[in-house]
Image (cartoon, grey):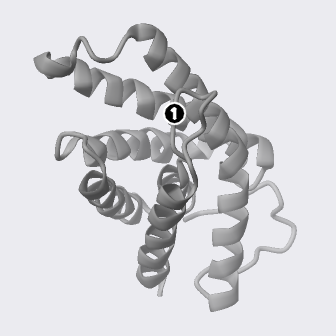
Amino acid sequence: MVWLIMILALGAAVVLENAVPAWHLGGQTRLPAVLCVVMYYALNHSLVAALAAALVAGVMADAISGLPPGSTPLAFSLLVAAVSRNRGFVFIRQWLTHMVIGAAAGAVLMLIMYGVLCLRLEQMRAVSPAVAALKMLGAGLQGMLLMPWVFMALEGLEKMTGCRRSLIGDEFGIFDKT
């Protein structure tokens, strides 16, 4: 059931990301809904499930964007590895944690994508560092605002379907052994 919820959540995130217009003041960045779903799985599930979410989400994102194939799965996998490795040091169920991870993941994803574009010589002149910095800021702000809501929705969905049991007295996520 976890895998079914993952696929449905990623599909809904792709639709949401493409339905919401790009934020003009944030450098024309799209809503990082897919990234937030991937970060949810990095925080709450095993590394295998999180990497599976990263690869599926990356392939979906590459299929609908004009980025070089394989760049988004690589970026998502790097972010998943970093968050999964360090999730024992944060309070998993706190909104501040979600906001910080959403902001950092959005900014780092834009940085990785800018690096990928710089590796392609024909597109190196098309993206200036000022535009890349504006996109990093925009993606970070949007990730910061969206990540707590994605976390709350997916955690509630997993509790309703029985995929995740509610731990009484574990508001801070310190007893989470997943």
Q: Is residue 61 left or right of residue 117?
A: right
Q: In front here: 56 or 117?
A: 117
At 68% from the left and 40% from the top, the residue drawn is 144
Q: Is residue 101 visible?
A: no
How many marks on residues?
1
Residue beneath label 1, please?
28
Q: Is residue 120 left or right of residue 31?
A: left
Q: Amino acid at mark 1?
A: Gln
Q: Is residue 152 above or below residue 126?
A: below
What is the x, y in percent for residue 75? 33, 39
What is the x, y in percent for residue 41? 50, 60
What is the x, y in percent for residue 126? 28, 17
At 81% from the left and 64% from the top, the residue drawn is 170
Q: Is residue 154 above or below residue 164?
A: above
Q: Is residue 117 above or below residue 164?
A: above
At 62% from the left and 79% from the top, the residue drawn is 158
In this view, the residue farthest toward the left is 121
Q: Is residue 82 above or below residue 112?
A: below
What is the x, y in percent for residue 88? 60, 45
At 48% from the left and 80% from the top, the residue drawn is 2
Q: In front here: 170 or 142?
A: 142
Q: Quadrant of residue 99?
A: top right
Question: Which secondary structure, mark 1?
Answer: loop
Q: Is residue 36 visible?
A: yes
Which image quadrant: the C terminus? bottom right
Q: In front here: 109 or 49?
A: 109
In this view, the residue farthest toward the right is 169
Q: Residues within 10 Å of mark 1 (few under 14, many from 20)?
A: some
